[in-house]
Amino acid sequence: MVFAPGEKPGNEPEEVQLQNASKQIVQNAILQAVRQVSQESQHREERISDSRNHIQLGVGELTKKHEKK
């Protein structure tokens, strides 16, 4: 194994540790982003569902009022 000037043979494990830590940071960031997108999508779907239910109630009320006349 050839080392550059100033590089020590004992640095390899430290470099591996830094690489592993870096990978872990990236994985955690990706997981957090995926969770956030998933939560936002779920909230959006809930709002859409609530809006649909509200509209259906409104249509039902209009139909009942029309039938009473």
Image: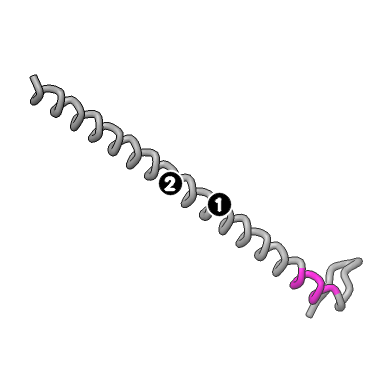
| Rendered image quadrant of residue 25 | bottom right
> Of helix, strand and loop, which one carries label 2?
helix
Badge number at residue 41 = 2
| Rendered image quadrant of residue 49 | top left
Q: Residue 5 appears at what percent x and percent y? A: 89, 67
Task: Give the main secondary structure of the magenta stretch.
Answer: helix
Tell which residue pokes out farthest to the bottom in this image: 1
> Of helix, strand and loop, which one carries label 1?
helix
Q: Residue 7 appears at what percent x and percent y? A: 87, 69
Tag 2: Cα neighbours inside 10 Å, few (<14), some, or many (≥20)?
Answer: few
Q: Residue at x 10, y 23 (%)?
A: 68
Q: Which residues are magenta?
A: 11-17
Report the front residue among 68 and 58.
Answer: 68
Query: Is 37 left, or right, of 18 in this rendering?
Result: left
Q: Residue 44 appears at what percent x and percent y? A: 41, 41
Q: Residue 64 appears at what percent x and percent y? A: 14, 28
Report the front residue among 35 and 9.
Answer: 35
Identity of the amino acid at label 2?
Ser
- The answer to whether residue 68 is above or below residue 20 is above
Q: Residue at x 39, y 44 (%)?
A: 46
Identity of the amino acid at label 1?
Ala
Does label 2 or label 1 sit earlier along the sequence?
1
Which residue lies under the disc numbered 1? 33
Image quarter hosting the C terminus: top left
Q: What is the spatial separation of the Cα atoms under label 2 and label 1, in whole angstroms? A: 12 Å
Q: Residue at x 76, y 66 (%)?
A: 18
Marks 2/1 in contact by CB < 8 Å: the verdict is no
